[in-house]
Image (spheres, rainbow, N blue to C red):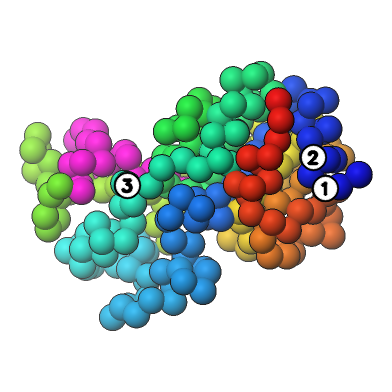
Amino acid sequence: MTGQGQLQKWIQDSDNIVFFGGAGVSTESGIPDFRSVDGLYNQKYDQPPETILSHTYFVRHTQEFYRFYRDKMLCLDAKPNAAHRMLAELERAGKLKAVVTQNIDGLHQQAGSQTVYELHGSVHRNYCTKCRAFFGVDFIAEGEGVPCCPVCGGLVKPDVVLYEEGLDQDTVEGAVRAIAQADVLIIGGTSLVVYPAAGLINYYRGNKLVLINRDPTPYDGQADLVIHDSIGKVLGGIEL
């Protein structure tokens, strides 16, 4: 049986699937992968992106942070691809219980997924650091300079996890619970080198661990099924 055929069978036979995805899920929607050859880490800036996207830089160089953030982090024209659409379909069919994602683009929800654990937050949520007033993505995208709260004048910050910041505990606990209870765990579009997110797969207790990624990962040897191919092509080829 081919890898695609085995995946098809496991999906058909299960009603307790969890998907854990990374940047590779969104690159097929035109959103650059930080660590790819064409990714943000290989473009030329005065500071490397991992410095600009740190909590320290945000506090000390807020204006520059927002210039970069608006320019490179808001990919609002991107649309869900075949992988996003199939995952939403699997959830509607009662097979997929949750999506756990490292992405901040909101494409899973745009495709129709309901239960999504966003480990690194979302560009679509922004909060005043003083009064906690909520603002949508357009408030940041259409503004200039440092965004200030029209209610209290406080600094508005994207609800994304910057370098040096911890993950949201409720989100992590929900993701861990879903992964621990899963029958089939499908991991796609992630190199599994970013911690603590990558460590979540250690909570999986089943025997149907599927890795779908163009390139090898450190966990290939632990997986029950490895498919080195496009995540959109593989998931888009599933028949319900």
Of 101 and 196, the residue lying toward us: 101
* Res. 53 image quadrant: bottom left
Which segment did they paint magenta?
117-141
The reply to whether the C-beta atoms of the residues labelled 3 and 1 are less than 8 Å apart is: no
Residue at the spot x=37%, y=64% of the render? 54
Is-magenta flag for residue 28?
Answer: no
- Dot 3 or dot 1: first in sequence order is 1
State the residue position of label 1: 3
Furthest-right residue in view?
1
Residues packed near mark 2 inside 10 Å, few (<14), some (14 to 19) or many (20 plus): many
Q: How many marks?
A: 3
State the residue position of label 2: 7
- Dot 2 or dot 3: first in sequence order is 2
Q: Secondary structure at mark 3?
A: loop
Residue at the spot x=60%, y=47% of the render? 232
Q: Is residue 215 left or right of residue 55?
A: right
Residues packed near mark 1 inside 10 Å, few (<14), some (14 to 19) or many (20 plus): some
Q: Is residue 39 visible?
A: yes
Answer above or below: position of 172 versus 71: above
Q: Is residue 106 left or right of residue 224?
A: left
Alpha-carbon distance for marks 3 and 1? 33 Å
Kindly identify the amino acid type of the residue bearing the numbered disc 1: Gly
Is-magenta flag for residue 127?
Answer: yes
Residue at the spot x=63%, y=40% of the render? 236
Answer above or below: position of 55 versus 48: above
Alpha-carbon distance for marks 1 and 2? 6 Å
Kindly identify the amino acid type of the residue bearing the numbered disc 3: Asp
Q: Secondary structure at mark 1?
A: helix
The reply to whether the C-beta atoms of the residues labelled 1 and 2 are less than 8 Å apart is: yes
State the residue position of label 3: 77
